[in-house]
Amino acid sequence: MDSIDTPPSSSSAGGLCTLRFRDRRGPPHSPNKKKKPGISSAPISTHDRHRRDRGGDAPPSTPPPPLASFSDLPFDVLARVAATFDVPNLWAASMACRAWREALRPLREAMVLLRWGKRFRHGHGGVRPNPQRALEYFLKGAALGSAPAMVDAGVMYWEMGEKEKAMAFYEKAAELGHPVGQSNLGTCYLEANWPEKAVQWFRQAAESGYARAQYNLALCLHRGRGVDYNLQDAAKWYLKAAEGGNVRAMYNTSLCYSLGEGKPRNIQRARMWLKCAADCGHKKAQFEHGLELFNEI
């Protein structure tokens, strides 16, 4: 079986704005306002006529309903809601209404900073690679609450050898619910020889559908590292990760079907996943698939 998948090279305040509830009773009554002489053209409702005939007065008007504002929500709640948003989804959510637009303004600004950070990191968009400038943009985006920017800042610190700083940023992103941050934090705990904690974060990210975390969780289950040995669960997560595009999981899934480990033995499926892994560039899968083709001649 292959080894643990290490962290990827990159991750995939306005003024108070309120929503007023519409008062369907019409404008509030002004008792001190003088009426113009003459007959009013407004019709008298049956309820008003009945109250007038009884000689009763109208009840005092109730105060308008309270104001609702997304801007009053704690910012960590907003950041958690938008943690997994990509740029189009965040933009669409912020345009849904004025209140959301104002509340999500810092995260939209963070998305712009994140894109500039990626440009300077990879040399895209007409700029030369500049790791220091890239890190500056990632840190600014992270300060505005962007979980993807926290992950990218963590990756850069990890590559610079400052693993404690990297782990701190991964933890912030993980607590916001970002699956890449959760998976990378799990890898940090695994390297720190705390496999039980690593499995907890791998599982959270795996259940969110992140293929790399699904593969790492399967590997821990397969080896009994930080969790009880369970070959059936390992094979299940290998398959999920393979279906999500993880190349190492494709190869391990082919082994599960070929050897009948955690899955019923199925040579046809084993060959299918071996070919998928080979087509995606897995060296060992390419060699074994080549041997199979040679033996068929």
Image (tube, helix red, strand yellow):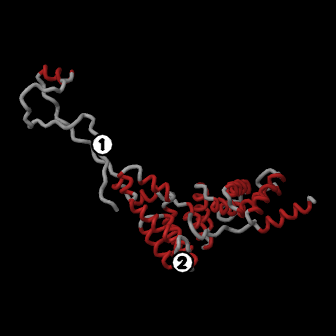
Quadrant (top left, top right, bottom left, bottom right) of the C terminus: bottom right
Residue type beneath disc 2: Arg
User: In the structure shown, which secondary structural element does the residue marked by tag 1 occupy?
Assistant: loop
Quadrant (top left, top right, bottom left, bottom right) of the N terminus: bottom right
Give the residue pinned by disc 2: 128
Say if 29 sits above or below 105 in the image: above
The reply to whether residue 168 is in sight is no
Residue at (71% x, 62% y) in the render? 247
Say if 175 sits above or below 165 in the image: above
Asked whether, in this view, residue 136 is left or right of residue 208, the answer is left
Mark 1 vs 2, N-terminal side: 1
Asked whether, in this view, residue 6 is left or right of residue 164, the answer is right
Q: Position of residue 88 (x, y in %)?
A: 49, 56
User: In the structure shown, which secondary structural element does the residue marked by tag 2 occupy?
Assistant: loop
| Few, some or many residues within 10 Å of mark 1 (<14, 14–19, 20+) | few
Give the residue pinned by disc 1: 21
Residue at (48% x, 60% y) in the render? 176
Q: Position of residue 265 (x, y in %)?
A: 82, 52
**Front-lying residue, 198 or 104:** 104
Residue at (50% x, 70% y) in the render? 169
Residue 112 location, quadrant: bottom left
Q: Position of residue 63 (x, y in %)?
A: 21, 41
